[in-house]
Image (cartoon, rainbow, N blue to C red):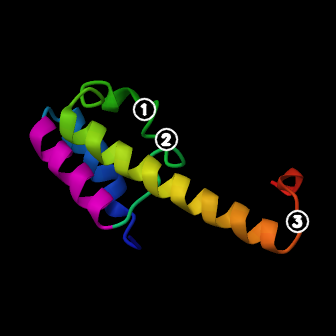
Amino acid sequence: MRDPKWRWRIRILQGLGEGEKAIKEFVAVTEAGWLGYYRDGYKDHPLMDGLRDEPRILEAIRKIEDELSRQKTAVYEKLSRHNLTSSLI
């Protein structure tokens, strides 16, 4: 996910009325490991309004959230093993 161009492709495709292509692009980058749905502003971006209720988008977002939760748990476990508290986070 080093190429930032795809980030704009989803928004541009949706803006051009190419919702199906935008959905496929969103799913593809998610499957490739992109987790930036929240960080990159997709959660609240107006161009995502027409896609948010789409089942494939919802499934991709669920996978993002599952992976972020898994990573968070791993970090907390590692902090705990080193006697560091969650107050550091």
- Write the start and end of the magenta stretch as one range: 18-32
Residue at 20% x, 41% y is: 56
Residue 64: give x, y in percent of width and height: 41, 51
Describe residue 15's horizontal placement relative to residue 78 as left or right.
left
Front residue of this view, candidates 4 and 33: 33
Q: Is residue 86 magenta?
A: no
Q: Could you tell me how far apart the alpha carbons at marks 1 and 2 are, in whole angstroms? A: 6 Å
* Residue type, numbered disc 2: Gly
Badge 1 is on which residue? 45
Label number found at residue 41: 2
Name the residue that disc number 3 marks.
Answer: 84
Disc 2 to disc 3, how far (Cα)? 31 Å
Give the SS element for disc 3: loop
Quarter of the image for residue 82 reads bottom right
Residue at 15% across / 50% down in the picture? 24
Q: Mainly helix, strand or loop, the magenta region?
A: helix
